[in-house]
Amino acid sequence: MKPGKKCTVWEWIDEEPENMKPIAEDTLSDVADYLIQVLEDVASVREEVKQLKVMVCVLILLVIGKVMFWG
């Protein structure tokens, strides 16, 4: 680039743009509450998956027992 010319690729901004609004605290609180609920839901689903895995294993054992012993 030649001396005295402006760069047209980058624009340096030291201040926040005027149209940028700060995030309200109640909005952050709502997001935090939502994330907490999502994490609780995930924990609940994981527990249900564990229970279903146990039930599937029991059913498989019952089927194997029926085939082997009660033919």
Image (spheres, grey):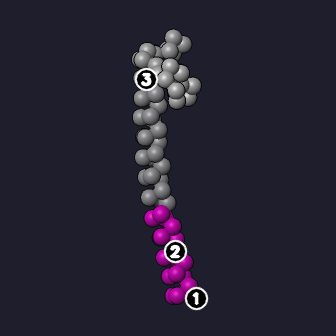
Q: Badge 3: few (under 14), some or many (20 or more) residues near its Cα, within 10 Å?
A: few
Q: Is residue 24 visible?
A: no
Between 8 and 64, the one lying in front of the other is: 8
Q: Is residue 7 magenta?
A: no
Point out the image quarter for the C terminus. bottom right
| Image point (52%, 88%), residue name | 68
| Image point (49%, 23%), residue name | 3
- Residue highlighted by disc 1: 71
Between 20 and 62, the one lying in front of the other is: 20
Q: Callout 1, which amino acid?
A: Gly
Q: Nearer the viewer, mark 3 or mark 2?
A: 3
* Part of the protein shown in magenta: 53-71
Between 21 and 6, the one lying in front of the other is: 6
Marks 3 & 1, CB-CB < 8 Å contact: no
- Residue highlighted by disc 3: 28
Q: Position of residue 12 (x, y in %)?
A: 47, 22
- Which mark, residue 60? 2
Marks 2 & 1, CB-CB < 8 Å contact: no
First reached walking from the N terminus: tag 3 or tag 1: 3
| Image point (41%, 34%), residue name | 36
What type of secondary structure mainly makes up the magenta span? helix
The local secondary structure at tag 2 comes to helix
Q: Badge 2: few (under 14), some or many (20 or more) residues near its Cα, within 10 Å?
A: few
Q: Disc 3 to disc 1, how far (Cα)?
A: 63 Å
